[in-house]
Amino acid sequence: MKAVCLGPCGTFSHEMAMKVYGDDILLLPTIGDVFAAVIDQGCPGIVPVENSDAGAVGPVMDCLREYPVSITGEGYMNIRHHLAARDPHSQITVIYAHPQAHDQCRRVLDTLGAEIIHTSSNSASARMAAETVDAAAVTTMAAALNEGLAILQEDIQNSRINITRFIRIERSPGPPITGGKCSLIIDPGEDRPGLLYEILGIFYALSLNLTRIESRPSKRDIGSYVFFIDVTIGEGLERALSRVRAVAEVKNLGCYGRMEVES
């Protein structure tokens, strides 16, 4: 069965998907298309969910809330960004970059004085730069080579340690596990003083470690949020979920461990 991920060829998602599934990959143009294919075709998908420098990948977070998928695994990859162009001697006036790549390379890009144009992927950035003499791309080494671009500057990311966390999404939950983590979306609905404190206190009281807390707009009103929470699996987890459901809506995205990833 093919796995799906964000394309075109040469994206970091493609690289991670190949580490898990080899060459049996279907590349799709948008994150939303990846989620839709998981539901419609029953195939696994690989998507980036957060980066150590730029934080959460917003479109993925929103799709996790919108689509009835389960997270069945996670993996981590060190991310290197490079500045590449068709003509290494031209005056660069435009730089194509995916929004996440832009955030992860802002320190260098802010010094170049070029217009930044956002694209759908790092590979799309390379393809667009290959079509314009005075343009460069923030892209992967593989995508730059695929498009015949010259590398102007290697490793332009803000931090030497630049790690992206990827998750595997599937239509059905994975098998029960005793270790790993569980990802939740908690929607308090109407806000009231102390509600988030109360919810977090439930996990604390049962000695459950929260490894991530992220807020996203609920899209109901300004100042209204839902919370994405990762919690280490422990024997009190089911009791905690029962207590949280008494005060908020909970979507359990799944319990999972590390994916088997080729080095």
Image (tube, rainbow, N blue to C red):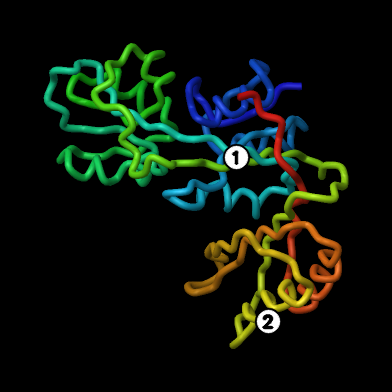
For the point 71% across and 40% down, which residue is it?
258
The vertical placement of 57 against 15, above or below, is: below
Q: Is residue 12 left or right of residue 234?
A: left
Residue closest to the eye, 34 or 260: 260
Q: Is residue 211 left or right of residue 82?
A: right
Q: Secondary structure at mark 2?
A: helix
Q: Residue 165, position in %: x, y?
A: 57, 42
For the point 55% across and 64% down, which residue is it?
215
- Residue at which label 1 appears: 166
Label 1 vs label 2: CA separation?
30 Å
For the point 69% across and 76% down, which residue is it?
199
Quadrant in which residue 28 is drawn:
top right
Dot 1 amino acid type: Phe
The vertical placement of 184 against 67, above or below, is: below
Q: Residue 257, position in %: x, y?
A: 74, 44
Q: Residue 243, position in %: x, y?
A: 81, 75
Dot 2 amino acid type: Glu
Q: Is residue 123 left or right of residue 95?
A: right
Q: Secondary structure at mark 1?
A: strand
- Residue at which label 2 appears: 198
Mark 2: few, some, or many residues within 10 Å (few <14, many ≥20)?
few
Mark 1: few, some, or many residues within 10 Å (few <14, many ≥20)?
many
Residue projecting furthest to the bottom: 193
Q: Residue 34, position in %: x, y?
A: 62, 35
Quadrant in which residue 205 is drawn:
bottom right
Quadrant in which residue 147 is drawn:
top left
